[in-house]
Image (cartoon, coloured by chain):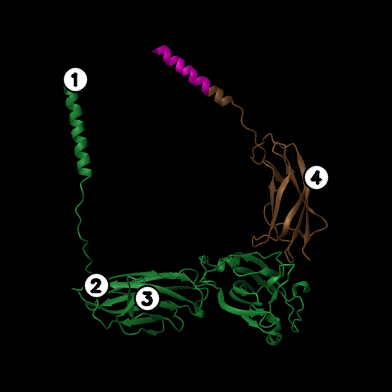
């Protein structure tokens, strides 16, 4: 009996030790999981006005080679106050983060965002090129 | 413990447990509650949302006494600030019919309002009634608090009171269902809470804050728009402004903000815009135009002189270039 208890305790101890020594999944400075994925691109883009209604005209043109997002907005859209929304490849993140209304009124100097892959090793900077519907 | 005494112990425990279960499941006998032998009263406020000058606050005041003790003789509502004309108390006590409709039975003479008090004197022999009181918020109550004291008296000389409030009266005011039309009633003054045509706008040029414009363009979304007179002319296509109409404003578009005061018939209109929304509104960096507006769209506005903030809601629009708008307005200075 005593021998069985000893064996059981030994197995339990080994299990606990093994579990506690298991390597944690890595996370980045934002607390996001770092994965092995190397995909790094923008798959969709949206622009919302202050009323949270899209101001986009037609589909955005995303060039993953040129790393540009071209989007036409409605006549009269307030370019100083727009909410951009990016859809990215799986596990990617965006830098800088979008925290609210963004000013797109300087149409000569395009806004840029960097897409960072899931493994955090690939970085691609996209320019968002806005044109206004005549 | 010997086996025999152990069994006796188990049996004893079992019996005790059964006794507990039986007693805990026993149904309590019901006794009719005994009605208080004193004159009773209770009040509720029936209206929701901000209390706006010119609008009603509705109360339901219930009072009752045992029939063996007496009957109701009068009901008085006393406001801390006298209500505006139109303040009254129903002389009918309502009950709900099977159809769900409120049915009123006259129980007293029409209410008499004198200063801060409104009185209904009972004319029928009744020991219980619920009367509704409609307090029309007066201008002098703006930004202050109001309390309402209800008092019921009975034939045995008893009197009972309950006080409702204090209720804060909003600083803002509102104007409902203003009709605007393209090339005619298109000049909006927030300060005056009025829509003008070109002739009248010229006479009130310093007060014109917005121009209503409608353009149906096949290749761009212009539609209904509110534009400050000082905005870029591309947002005022073909419009020659009356002399002196040149103010700017800050405008912020929103959608589906269906304020219940401005849009009482909207299906989802359960939102109320109150003073605090105007106080916290930040229109820094907002443009001086809002185009492509439609029904249920709204625009937050701040006038050029910083005197007013407003929320203008589009109740309805038509493709003939007309719209019905309603406005809540908050004076900043």
Residue B132 — which label? Answer: 3
Chain bearing tag 4 is A
Residue B241 lies in what quarter of the image? bottom right
Query: Gap in Å between the C-alphas at discs 4 and 3?
Result: 72 Å
Q: Compare marks 1 and 2 and give the one earlier in the sequence.
A: 1
Q: Which chain does the residue under circle 3 lie in?
A: B
Q: Which residue is mark 4?
A: A65
Q: In the depicted view, which residue is nearer to us: B51 or A109?
A: A109
Question: Real-space Cα distance between discs 4 and 1?
Answer: 89 Å
In the rendered image of this protein, which colour is used for chain B?
green
In the image, the segment drawn in magenta is A1-15
Using the image, determine if residue A9 lies above or below residue B219: above
Is residue B192 visible to us here? no
Q: CA distance from mark 1 to mark 2?
A: 69 Å
Pointers 3 and 1 within a single chain: yes
Q: Which residue is mark 1?
A: B3
> Mostly what secondary structure, the magenta segment?
helix
Marks 1 and 2: which is nearer the front? Answer: 1
**Mark 4 crowd level (few <14, some 14–19, many ≥20, 10 Å Cα):** few
The quadrant where residue B287 appears: bottom right
- How far apart, in angstroms, are the residues tagged by discs 4 and 2? 85 Å
Residue located beneath label 2 in the image: B65
**Chain hosting mark 2:** B
Lower sequence index among marks 3 and 1: 1
Q: Nearer the viewer, mark 2 or mark 3?
A: 3
Please state the horizontal and vertical placement of residue A30, each as a whole percent of the image: 66, 41
Q: Which chain is brown?
A: A
Q: Chain of mark 1?
A: B
Tell me the element at label 3: strand
Count of labels in the image? 4
The lab-note entry on whether marks 2 and 3 share a chain reads yes
């Amino acid at each position: 009996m005593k021998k069985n208890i000893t064996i059981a305790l030994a197995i339990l101890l080994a299990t606990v030790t093994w579990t506690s020594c298991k390597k944690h999944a890595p996370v980045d400075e934002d607390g996001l999981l770092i994965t092995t994925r190397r995909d790094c691109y923008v798959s969709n883009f949206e622009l919302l006005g202050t009323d949270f209604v899209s101001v986009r005209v037609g589909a955005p043109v995303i060039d993953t080679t040129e790393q540009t997002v071209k989007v036409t907005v409605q006549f009269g859209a307030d370019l100083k106050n727009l909410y951009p929304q990016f859809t990215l490849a799986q596990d990617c993140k965006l830098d800088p983060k979008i925290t609210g209304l963004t000013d797109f009124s300087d149409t000569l100097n395009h806004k840029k965002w960097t897409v960072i892959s899931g493994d955090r090793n690939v970085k691609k900077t996209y320019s968002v090129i806005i044109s206004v519907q005549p | 413990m010997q086996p025999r005494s152990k069994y006796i112990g188990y049996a004893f425990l079992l019996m005790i447990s059964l006794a507990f279960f039986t007693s805990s499941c026993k149904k309590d006998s019901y006794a009719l509650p005994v009605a208080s032998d004193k004159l009773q009263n209770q009040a509720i406020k029936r209206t929701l949302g901000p209390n706006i000058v010119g609008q009603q606050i509705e109360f339901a005041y219930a009072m009752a006494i045992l029939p063996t003790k007496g009957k109701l003789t009068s009901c008085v509502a006393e406001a801390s600030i006298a209500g505006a004309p139109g303040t009254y108390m129903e002389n009918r006590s309502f009950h709900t019919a099977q159809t769900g409709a409120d049915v009123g039975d006259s129980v007293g003479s029409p209410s008499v309002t004198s200063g801060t008090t409104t009185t209904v004197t009972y004319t029928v022999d009744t020991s219980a009634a619920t009367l509704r009181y409609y307090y029309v918020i007066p201008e002098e109550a703006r930004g202050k608090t109001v309390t309402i004291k209800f008092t019921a008296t009975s034939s045995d000389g008893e009197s009972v009171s309950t006080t409702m409030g204090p209720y804060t009266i909003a600083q803002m005011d509102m104007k409902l269902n203003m009709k605007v039309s393209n090339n005619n009633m298109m000049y909006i003054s927030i300060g005056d809470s009025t829509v003008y045509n070109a002739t009248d706008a010229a006479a009130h040029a310093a007060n014109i804050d917005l121009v209503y414009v409608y353009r149906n363009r096949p290749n761009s979304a212009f539609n209904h728009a509110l534009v400050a007179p000082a905005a870029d002319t591309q947002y005022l296509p073909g419009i020659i402004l009356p002399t002196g109409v040149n103010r700017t404003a800050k405008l912020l578009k929103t959608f589906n903000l269906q304020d219940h005061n401005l849009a009482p018939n909207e299906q989802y209109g359960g939102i109320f815009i109150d003073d605090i929304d105007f106080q916290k509104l930040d229109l820094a960096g907002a443009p001086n135009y809002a185009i492509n507006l439609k029904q249920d769209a709204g625009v937050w506005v701040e006038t050029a002189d910083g005197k007013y903030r407003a929320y203008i809601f589009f109740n309805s629009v038509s493709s003939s270039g007309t719209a019905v708008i309603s406005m809540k307005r908050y004076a900043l200075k």
